Image (cartoon, rainbow, N blue to C red):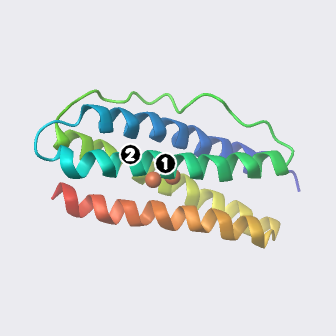
Amino acid sequence: MSNAPLIEKLNEALGWELRAISQYSHYAAYIRGIHRFQLAPHFNSEAQESMTHADTVRASIVKLGGIAVTERNPKAIEHTSDYKIMLQESLDTEISASKVYSEILTLVEKTGDSDLYDSIEQIYLAEVRSVEELRMLVE
Ligand SMILES: [Fe+2]
Ligand SMILES: [Fe+2]
């Protein structure tokens, strides 16, 4: 079986992680008002986490013999200093990420590569936790 569809999906996830790094770093820099106390560190740690996820995904692409993308997902990052918009945009990002990772898990399952499955599953679960958390924050 060709690895091409799996590599393509992993590259899609990598594009979302690269976009998430930009989005969260941007929001950490622009968050204003009292929420800056909590949300600046939160957005910075999300940016770090996205960097870690990107590293894992990129290494998997290399291992499968693919070429990792260097461009982020092209979806525009909304500039704002309003925390409510930031949280809603973050939720949308995390939903997109968790969807791509669940699609990757389906493909990895067919390859029988349990190491790859475990590492992608860890990322997927982190994205799902972020979705749950952000859903409560935007209420
Ligand atoms: Fe991520
Ligand atoms: Fe995430």
How far apart, in angstroms, are the residues tagged by discs 2 and 1? Answer: 6 Å
Label 1 sits on a secondary structure element that is helix
- Residues at badges 2 and 1 in contact (C-beta under 8 Å)? yes
Q: Is residue 95 left or right of residue 102?
A: left
Residue depicted at x 15% and y 59%: 139
Percent position of residue 94, x then y: 41, 52
Which residue is painted at 48% across and 57% down in the image? 98
Residue located at (49% from left, 48% from top): 48
Q: Amino acid at mark 1?
A: Gln
Where 127 sits versus 41, above or below? Answer: below
Examine the rendering and report whether any part of residue 108 can be seen: yes
Indicate the position of residue 90 as horizontal and vertical percent values.
Answer: 33, 46
- Amino acid type of the residue tagged 2 in the rendering: Asn
Residue 12 location, quadrant: top right
Q: Nearer the viewer, residue 130 or 8?
A: 130
Q: Which residue is mark 2?
A: 44
Q: How many marks?
A: 2
Disc number at residue 48?
1
Residue that appears at 49% across and 28% down: 74
